[in-house]
Amino acid sequence: MRTSLLSLFLSFCFLVVFAQKENPRKEVIVEGLKRPWSMAFLSEDEVLVGEKEGGLVRINLSTKQKFPISGFPGDLADSVGLKGIGDNAGIFQVLTDPEFRRNKFIYVSYASGNGEGSTTRIIRAILDKDRMEKVQTLFVATPYTPERFHYGGGMVFGADGKLYFTIGERLFKEIDEPALPIAQNIEDRRGKIYRINPDGSIPADNPDFGPKAVPGLYATGIRAAQGIIVEPATKKIWFSEHGTFQGDEINMLRPRANYGWPVKTTGKYRSADYVPPVLDGNVYTPPVWYWLQTVAPTGLSFYTGDEFPSWKNDLIVPGLSWGSLWRFRIEGETVKSVEELFVDDRVRLRRVVQSPGGKLYLLTDEKNGKIIRVKNSRTLAGDGGKKPDQ
């Protein structure tokens, strides 16, 4: 009798859990940010935020207090006053070292400017209270050029302890490509993904592109990749890539892979009369997924928290175009299903980040930029009522 009652109780619990539907809603935590691009957690309540029209700030998510970080290099080219191209300058990403509690290292990618124009710079510094000390340049994507497009700047530490980062190809129109396109030229620093040691030296086991290749080169054929993330369960690295008209992609990073730009694309060229060259011997790696519409995917993240049980291990991808947010169910290296979230509540999004405790946050790309927490108000199927947040 006891066994039957226990079985009945467990079956009821299973049905209740199964009937629960994830009901995500947004809660603004902080606002008044200057077009924030990225966020790195120092603790559950303390974050560093990089802004495109401001600087680097420390924010307490509980008290809402903001503290500017001093000591940033003076070559920062922000997007203040730029009309029509304001999305393409400033600080791109801030990242903490895997051993941050011990060494206090932070890494920042940003638009560096001089008299010739601007380019992407990667630096490392020690965060001493609210000041950057001992700033070290790890990489500069020369040449400096007048264009303010496609800087890249996505960064992530791999499970191997190496720093991976993206550099865009910087051109707006394909018709301006040289005979050997920028992203296909192993001697050109632009349009690539790199792998370096945290101190800027080159790992001995990096792929060999030949003696003339840019040091640290890991993959080629990149147009404007911004988001890059490690999948916690498999330790594989995934990255987002901007197409031109349509053709935005989700890719898996592989050593020595060539992702095709501009020879191969899943979208359309901005220059309708552009004819890409035929490069004999090249093998191109197709995307894992691409959209049929323009999404402009940015800083993606794998969800491993407990607040949304049915989202466990899913890839969450924000988009700039139309303010979209996407959830990908992935098995191995295959996208099995895709869901667009908040279709009736769109806002231009730059990044999705998970806190150490598993909370999910969004950064909005607005002049009044916001940090938004995605919370779960679960609805029991059939009763129409909401359960309190858990």
Image (cartoon, helix red, strand yellow):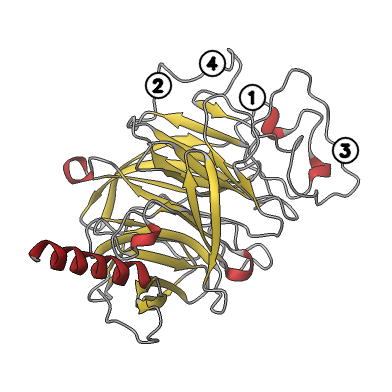
Residue type at tag 4: Asp
Label 1 – label 4 distance at C-alpha:
11 Å
Tell me the residue that label 1 is attached to: 186
Task: Establish if 209 lies above or below 291.
Answer: above
Choose between 386 and 323: the one closer to the eye.
386
Task: Establish if 266 lies above or below 219.
Answer: below
Label 1 – label 3 distance at C-alpha:
21 Å
Q: For mark 3, give the secondary structure.
A: loop
Kindly identify the residue that appears in the image at 78 percent across and 23 percent down: 279
Sequence-first tag of 2 and 3: 2
Q: Left or right of 300: which side holds 305? A: left
Residue type at tag 2: Pro
Tell me the residue that label 2 is attached to: 203
Task: Establish if 356 lies above or below 30.
Answer: above
Viewer-nearest of discs 2 and 3? 3
Viewer-nearest of discs 1 and 3? 3
Q: Is residue 212 visible?
A: yes
Residue type at tag 3: Val
Tell me the residue that label 4 is attached to: 208
